[in-house]
Image (cartoon, rainbow, N blue to C red):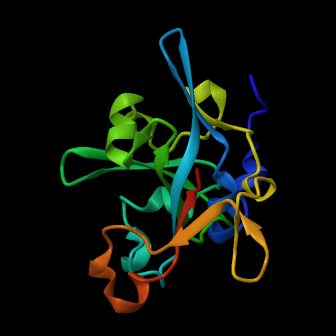
Amino acid sequence: MKKVISQKFFNRPVLEVAPDLLGKYLVRKIGQKIVRLKITEVEAYDGEKDLACHACKGRTQRTEIMYGEAGHFYIYLCYGMYWMLNIVTGEKNYPSAVLIRGVEGSEGPGKLTRELKIDKRQNGFPALPFSGLWIEGGEDPSSRAKLTTGRGQKSAVRRTARIGVSYAGPIWSKKKYRFVLKK
């Protein structure tokens, strides 16, 4: 077992937490079985001003968890069929979260939650072992210098626009808030 990531890790701005989650492990206890999968893709959602964020319409029963303590899971149903796994970040009363989009061996947030049997039952729980779902330490992508950027710096993380948020308008749908661990 690797070191469990503390709640303090998540109590930072979402655009710091999101790329730092890459290379860490999403861990799920299903019965007596423990499944550890490296996080390879995430998206950041940054408060009420972010028109792609559920909190853009303010505090609601659905988004209440996003306004709570960092390090808790925000899980919601998308299109009536896919559970989306998010983890709350930042200061209390500032609604931000990171969507876990992909893990090694499983791409797509709906497929991920289906394979790990994640649904509304984990909504609101802290990312700690007693909840059956948590994050453990892993590699630091910044130490994995595979590709060179235009400035001569090496990066193992690709930053792009988020997927499926065209409804947020031309500015927010193009924000590069998606982070992908390069292979």
Residue 152's place in the image compared with 141, above or below, is: below
- Evaluate whether residue 120 shows in this view: no
Image quarter hosting the N terminus? top right
Of residue 126 and residue 28, the one placed in the foreground of this image is 28
Q: Quadrant of residue 16?
A: bottom right
Q: Is residue 87 visible?
A: yes
> Which of the 4 image quadrants contains residue 167?
bottom left
Residue at image x 29%, y 79%?
166
Residue ID at (42%, 84%) = 172
> Residue 56's spot in the image, x, y percent?
40, 78
For residue 72, side relative to residue 56 (left or right): right
Spot the residue most to the bottom.
171
In this image, 99 relative to 6: left or right? left
Task: Name the residue located 39 percent from the left edge and 39 percent from the top edge.
Answer: 112
For the view shown, which residue lies furthest in the left direction?
80
Quadrant of residue 141 in the image? bottom right
Residue 41: x and y in percent read 52, 54
* 37 over 71 or under it: above or below: above
149 over 143 or under it: above or below: below
Question: Where 177 falls versus 121 (above or below)?
Answer: below
Q: Nearer the viewer, residue 147 or 31?
A: 147
Residue 106 location in percent, x, y? 42, 38
